[in-house]
Image (spheres, helix red, strand yellow):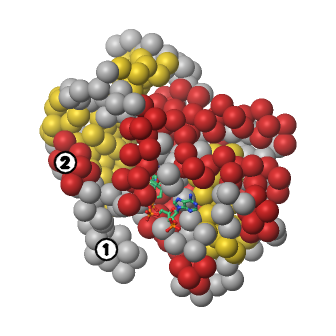
Amino acid sequence: MGYRVAVFGAYGHTGRFVMAELRERGFDALPVGRDARQLAVFGLGYRVASVDDPASLDAALTGADAVINCAGPFASTAAGVIEAALRAGIPYVDVAAEIEANLDTFAHFTERAHAAGVAVVPAMAFFGGLGDLLATTAMGDWTSADEAHVAYGLSSWHPTAGTVAAGVVSRERRDGRRVRYTGGRLEYQPGGELPRTDWDFPAPLGRRTVLGEFTMADVVTIPRHLAIPEIRTYMTVDATTDLAAAAAPVAVDELGRSAQTFTVDVIVRRGDARRRVVATGRDIYAVSAPLAVEAVRRVLDGRTRTSGVASAGEMFDAPDFLRALSPAIRVEPVSD
Ligand SMILES: NC(=O)c1ccc[n+]([C@@H]2O[C@H](COP(=O)([O-])OP(=O)(O)OC[C@H]3O[C@@H](n4cnc5c(N)ncnc54)[C@H](OP(=O)(O)O)[C@@H]3O)[C@@H](O)[C@H]2O)c1
């Protein structure tokens, strides 16, 4: 063990969960960020660095074995931290949920990361990473499918300031349009009301009204490596109402987790055949920590399936990865 892992954005809500997870698992966690006062709270050695100052990032990553970027919006931070990881020759993992920022990571760094032999795993978190691992697991021996559906059943969604800011950045980049994945590509359409439908989640959640075309980062991660031309993501309407109200999450346990629970229901369809895998757990920010840290662990151990920039399902053995997340995330196949 003894690997040193730098966490950029360590004192943010998600960064704190990642710092705790690293320490719990015996890593040497190195807090990095732009505010020395907030970094000092960890009571550890820390490094002050800014994405506008590459030399500060180089100094911050000196001696680190990997870096996890938790500082969002990632439209502002991902490229600078990936550049620094490439200069340092160390793996990079981030928790970006921004569709366009994740696309940029694939577009700008795939060749260079591959040539450098450096693993770069964007969206290695609840949105993007988990859906990809579940869809990959549901596919099993299928190499293609007609459709993938990822339905998010959140009991509530009190967003952090980072989530709200990322939403603003993404909306600005889309210029009021909405995005969906159809015909094997992302399609931008005029904005407007998202379609509503009912989704039958497994018990105990049961039937819930969801917004369709509530498009999340899974539409970037899944089609990187699975031939599925239609990918839809859905969100419980109650959670979207909370999201719009933007009240911050409230910690209710000693780990800092909120009372929020989640069910992620993934269905892939090929012809008349359907395969389904369901994940449940608590607090989408908290569970992003075991997702990101397990990814770093596997990259550092060489338990990877490819090199360069890759999504979770492409980089790792998805069923094995999901098993390692238990009990933080419980995963079950469901037969219809
Ligand atoms: N994919 C997922 O499922 C998932 C899960 C969790 C989080 N996220 C994403 O992760 C991001 C952070 O979320 P959060 O919950 O931790 O939010 P947060 O509590 O608001 O924390 C944001 C952190 O990012 C830092 N930061 C922001 N812009 C920065 C910049 N330009 N340079 C350096 N540091 C910067 C902030 O530092 P300052 O205080 O110095 O600004 C703070 O430490 C959001 O974009 C969120 O959407 C995604």
What kind of element bears circle 2? helix
Callout 2 amino acid:
Thr
Question: Is tag 2's residue or tag 1's residue first in the polypeptide sequence?
Answer: 2
35 relative to 298, above or below: below
Classify mark 2 as within 8 Å of ligand 1 or not, answering yes or no: no
What kind of element bears circle 1? loop
In this rendering, would 238 be left or right of 170? Answer: left
Callout 1 amino acid:
Ala
Q: Is residue 188 visible from the viewing direction of this image?
A: yes
**Front one among 279 and 66:** 66
The residue drawn where x is 44% and y is 44% is 169
Tell me where residue 77 appears, x and y as whole percent.
60, 52
Q: Quadrant of the N terminus?
A: bottom right
Q: What is the number of callouts on the image?
A: 2
Tell me where residue 117 appears, x and y as whole percent.
82, 43
User: What number is the disc on residue 251?
Assistant: 1
35 relative to 208, above or below: below
**Front one among 85 and 172:** 172
102 relative to 267, above or below: below
Tell me where residue 32 appears, x and y as whole percent.
64, 70
The residue drawn where x is 72% and y is 37% is 109
In this rendering, which labeled residue sits more in front, label 2 or label 1? Answer: 2
User: What number is the disc on residue 241?
Assistant: 2
* Separation (CA) of disc 2 from disc 1: 20 Å
Q: Residues within 10 Å of mark 2 (few under 14, many from 20)?
A: few
In this rendering, would 184 be left or right of 46? Answer: left
Tell me where residue 232 appears, x and y as whole percent.
36, 27
The residue drawn where x is 35% and y is 20% is 189
In this rendering, would 168 be left or right of 199? Answer: right
